[in-house]
Image: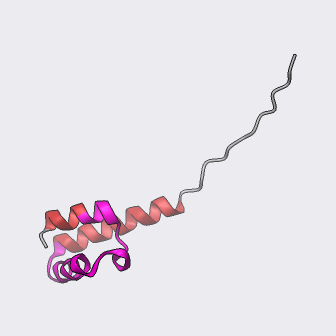
Amino acid sequence: MTLTELHATLDRLGPDLSVWPSTLAEPALDLISVSDAAKDLFAAATEASLRVDATPAPRWETTSATAP
């Protein structure tokens, strides 16, 4: 797997490697284990995912319409 392929797969599947097919997860782990750039990319994707998960859902306020 190349760094470009890792980036594309992270964008498509997210950083949770347990949901990746093993044919992608294993090469990704191999690349992450030897490449600082891949480690940085994976860390950034993980951090971004955690920020999105921690963002509170928007509050929806209901309004009651009164007929004239």
Extreme residue in the top direction = 68
Taking depth in this image into account, of 25 and 60 the one nearest to the observer is: 25
- Residue range corresponding to the magenta coloring: 9-36
Task: Judge left or right: residue 54 versus residue 37.
Answer: right
Residue 8 placed where, x, y %? 22, 61
Taking depth in this image into account, of 42 and 11 the one nearest to the observer is: 11
Assign the C terminus to one quadrant of the image.
top right
Extreme residue in the left direction = 2
Q: Main secondary structure of the magenta part?
A: helix
Residue at position x 26%, y 79% in the image: 25
Task: Judge left or right: residue 4 versus residue 57.
Answer: left
Residue 28 placed where, x, y %? 21, 77
Examine the image and state in which quarter residue 62 appears.
top right
Q: How many marks?
A: 0
Residue at position x 18%, y 80% in the image: 27
Q: Is residue 28 magenta?
A: yes
Residue at position x 28%, y 70% in the image: 42
Q: Is residue 39 magenta?
A: no
Residue at position x 77%, y 34% in the image: 63
Residue 29 placed where, x, y %? 23, 81
Residue 31 against residue 65 in the figure, above or below? below
Display coloring = secondary structure
Examine the image and state in which quarter residue 13 appears.
bottom left
Assign the N terminus to one quadrant of the image.
bottom left
Residue 68 against residue 44 in the figure, above or below? above
